[in-house]
Image (cartoon, helix red, strand yellow):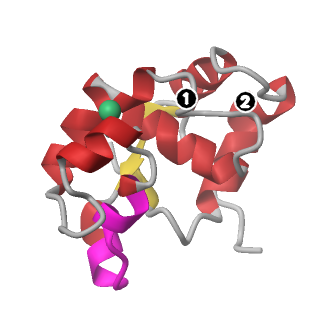
Amino acid sequence: MSEEVIIPSTAKWAIDLNWLKATGRSFSILARDTLCAKCRKKLKADSLEVKSTELLKTIQKCCSKSDNFITPGLPFQETIFRVILANGNKPITLAELGEALRQRPGIDVYRTSVIFLSRLMQDDVYYGIKCIPA
Ligand SMILES: [Zn+2]
């Protein structure tokens, strides 16, 4: 566990594409699994590296509206990643994130609290969800 840092409630979070790149991860690969079947085919996401701007736009406009975008069986960090994608990766506060999570089916309310989310997200070393300094 990393040392706990107190994060102000006004702090906003987003997927840090540069951080992902710097750690050798591909946003394109992480995000393409969230595409609906139609967009996956349209963007040729299985054979091409799709631009992150293109992915974000497509997911926000189309795929995130599908009932299968967030399902109760998904790992919780993946769910958070998807909620941020559905928001077009616009920086979001933890309170807003919790609110967005509560609108999805099958989410345990305890896990939508700011305290829980803050702890979970500080430990994220996979999706590159980072606190954006105000
Ligand atoms: Zn789609």
- Reply above or below: 68 against 23: above
The picture places residue 118, in percent across and down from the top left corner, at 65, 46
Q: Residue at x 14, y 57 (%)?
A: 51
Give the residue type that dot 2 points to. Answer: Thr
Residue 95 pos. (x, y %): 58, 24
Residue at label 1?
97
- On whether ligand 1 comes within 8 Å of the CB at mark 1, the answer is no
Taking 65 as reference, is 78 left or right? Answer: right
106 w.r.t. 72: above or below: above
What's the magenta bit mostly, secondary-structure-wise? helix
Numbered circle sitting on residue 85: none
Residue 9 image-quadrant placement? top right
Question: What's the CA distance linking mark 1 and mark 2?
Answer: 8 Å
Residue drawn where x is 52% and y is 33% of the image: 69
- Quadrant location of the C terminus in the rendered image: top left
Reply yes or no: does residue 23 show up in magenta. yes
Mark 1 neighbour class, 10 Å CA radius: few under 14, some 14 to 19, many 20 or more: many
Q: Quadrant of residue 27?
A: bottom left
Q: Is residue 10 magenta?
A: no
The magenta region covers: 20-31
Q: Secondary structure at mark 1?
A: helix
> What secondary structure is marked by label 2?
helix
Residue at 44% in and 56% down: 130
**Residue wearing tag 2:** 112
Q: Quadrant of ligand 1?
A: top left
